[in-house]
Image (spheres, rainbow, N blue to C red):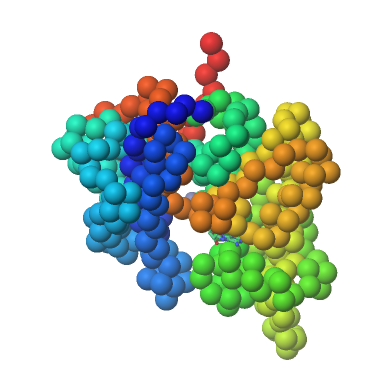
């Protein structure tokens, strides 16, 4: 990895975290400030887009000041500005993009827009400096469930993706049904430790024999039906057991599909990324599966799994080094495709 002194500052506002980070040489985190809006959205049981935008607008200045202060730097020292420009909540993304553009323009700093999945994958580069493409990535978040072959820095081949709900979305919805609170993923993870996954059996949806796609909406409906049926029969529902059984079903499908993908590509490196990568059972079962397959597993620390700007800065640094700099037309895109591999 390059040993330059490039200072990258990045902004992340795609959902409900306002984050600004500064990296040196694309790998060393000088600061990574994350202002979470969990408490704001908790009362609504999910993220309210308009409220998220308003909070990003209010927080982004102070969060940036804090990032500069912690890194001991001023804006004049920054070499590259990175920003998540999609996919995500349109209004939320706009706050980060407008701020990044304004600063880049005022200070004459190169501007780099970054795809959110690219950032999640890059969290692994921060955590594991020895990781280099090619490798397989399992990206599981509130908005995505993708199996991606990383063929080079910024070059991706999508092998499979969810056809309906993302894994994190299913966690959040099931947690709401079980009245476990928001955000649902960590709540289910905690409740599942007190329950028995064998208490209820939920079907693992694996789709066609050779498919690497996912589908989680049927599982979510099964949980909902189970809970409603038990309640209508007057039976008590043990939310810890249901949480454990649901979590086990999701994790089994994720591990099975990742295993199939590894067998198909012959890769010997697997990187886990995204908010659901924080799930303790997924980390445990994937570690065991990778061990059986003789594959090296890379997992970011918990703080780098969920949304943060350090991973955005890392992705922006690699794009900058590859000459992929944006102009003032850079815009927020709620839906945005990953850059595909280029073969010369
Ligand atoms: O990557 P992320 O912070 O935001 C998106 O890009 O979507 O992921 C958030 C998702 C939420 O659905 C949250 O419930 C889930 O990650 N999550 C978890 C855990 N921690 C966060 N899901 C399962 N187990 C966890 N421990
Ligand atoms: Zn994310």
Is 133 or 196 nearer to us in this picture?
Answer: 133
Relative vertical location of residue 192 with respect to residue 27 in this rendering, above or below: below
**Can residue 335 be seen from the camera position used here?**
no
Residue at (25%, 38%) from the top-left corner?
A: 77
Viewer-side residue, 109 vs 46: 109
* Image quadrant, ligand 1: bottom right
The answer to whether any part of residue 306 appears in the image is yes
- Quadrant for residue 61, please give it: bottom left
Q: Is residue 127 left or right of residue 215?
A: left
- Single out the residue that lies furthest toward the bottom: 234
Q: Is residue 170 left or right of residue 294?
A: left
Asked if 159 appears above or below 283 in the picture, the reply is above
Q: Going by the picture, which residue comes out furthest to the left?
A: 106
Query: Residue 136: x percent and y percent?
Result: 65, 35
Image location (x, y in percent) of residue 161: 61, 41
Q: Provide residue 225's location: percent of width, then percent of height.
A: 69, 71
Point 73% across, 33% down: residue? 268
Q: Is residue 5 above or below residue 332?
A: above
131 vs 59, left or right, is right
């Amino acid at each position: 990895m390059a040993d330059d002194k490039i200072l990258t500052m990045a902004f992340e506002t795609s959902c409900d975290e306002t984050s600004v980070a500064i990296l040196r040489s694309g790998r060393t985190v000088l600061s990574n400030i994350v202002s979470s809006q969990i408490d704001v959205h908790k009362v609504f049981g999910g993220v309210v887009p308009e409220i998220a935008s308003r909070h990003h607008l209010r927080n982004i200045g102070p969060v940036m000041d804090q990032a500069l202060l912690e890194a001991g730097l001023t804006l004049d020292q920054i070499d590259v500005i990175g920003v998540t420009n999609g996919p995500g909540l349109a209004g939320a993304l706009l706050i980060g993009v407008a701020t990044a553009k304004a600063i880049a323009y005022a200070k004459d700093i190169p501007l780099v827009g970054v795809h959110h999945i690219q950032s999640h994958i890059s969290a692994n580069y921060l955590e594991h400096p020895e990781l280099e493409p090619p490798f397989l990535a399992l990206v599981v978040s509130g908005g995505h469930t993708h199996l991606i072959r990383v063929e080079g820095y910024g070059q991706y081949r999508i092998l499979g993706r969810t056809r309906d709900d993302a894994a994190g979305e299913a966690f959040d919805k099931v947690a709401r049904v079980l009245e476990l609170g928001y955000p649902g993923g960590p709540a289910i993870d905690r409740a599942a430790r007190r329950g028995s996954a064998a208490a209820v059996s939920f079907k693992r949806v694996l789709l066609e024999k050779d498919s690497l796609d996912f589908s989680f909406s049927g599982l979510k409906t099964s949980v909902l039906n189970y809970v409603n049926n038990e309640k209508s029969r007057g039976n008590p529902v043990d939310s810890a057991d249901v949480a454990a059984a649901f979590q086990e079903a999701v994790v089994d499908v994720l591990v099975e599909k990742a295993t199939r993908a590894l067998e198909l590509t012959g890769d010997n490196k697997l990187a886990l990324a995204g908010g659901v990568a924080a799930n303790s059972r997924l980390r445990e079962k994937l570690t065991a599966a990778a061990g059986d397959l003789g594959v090296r597993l890379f997992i970011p620390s918990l703080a780098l799994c969920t949304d943060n700007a350090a991973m955005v800065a890392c992705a922006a640094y690699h794009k900058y080094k590859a000459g992929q700099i944006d102009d003032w037309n850079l815009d927020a895109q709620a839906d945005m495709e990953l850059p595909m591999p280029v073969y010369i």
